[in-house]
Amino acid sequence: MAKSCLYRIAETEGGLDTGYFVAMGLPPPNLVTFEPYSTRRPASQGGESRQGYLSCSVLWNRLDSIQANALYEIIATAESTFGEGNATMWMTIPRADASAPGLNWIDVSGIVLMPNFETEPGANGLTYPNVVLALNDVTVQNEPSNIFD
């Protein structure tokens, strides 16, 4: 399976099974970045160390109006009572890190922020540049992704 076909997005965790970007007409994003965090308690308090992600950003350099509308509808559903009702989204995205060579596909969930959809000047509303979908309070649900099960 081509790596560009592994991206998934859904309003519920179970929806990831059918939430492939390709099926929804969404192209793979141009860039996925994570904002990590790390905490460590002193040894006198148990010495516990925690690592995770504060947020994740998914960037498309350009979406056409049909793709932008599809993304908008997915996010609007997550924000409504039809989804979980709390703007929680689930995604399967790659993470490049030292834990595995190449790309490490993971399933994450987080609170989605609606991108700022601004049309490209002179494009008559047909293209949307620099669309950034942001997930806050990111939780890694499956590592590696259950897409390989």
Image (cartoon, helix red, strand yellow):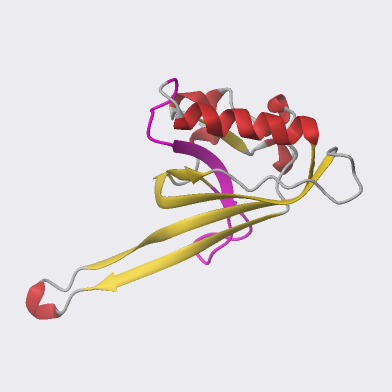
| Depth order, front residue of 148/111 | 111
Frontmost residue, 138 versus 125: 125
Q: Position of residue 14 (x, y in %)?
A: 45, 24
Specify the segment rendered in magenta. 82-105
Residue sitting at 75 percent across and 29 percent down? 25
The structure residue drawn at horizontal position 72% and vertical position 30%, both measured from the top left corner, is: 22
Query: Quick one: which residue is furthest to the top in this view?
Result: 82
* Picture residue at 11% right of the left edge, 71% below the top: 46
Q: Position of residue 91 (x, y in %)?
A: 53, 39
Residue 81 picture location, percent across and down: 40, 22
Residue 109 seen in render: no
Q: Pick out the residue farthest to the right.
A: 122
Name which residue lies at 59% across and 27% down.
Answer: 19
Is residue 44 toward the left or the right of residue 73 in the image? left
In-front residue for pair 91/118: 118
Give the x, y percent position of residue 125: 83, 39
Residue 35 is one of the magenta-drawn residues: no
Q: Seen in the image, is 16 located left or right of residue 4? A: left
Is 100 covered by the magenta stretch?
Answer: yes
Is there any visible trace of residue 92 in the rendered image? yes
Figure label count: 0
Compared with 53, 110 (above or below) is above
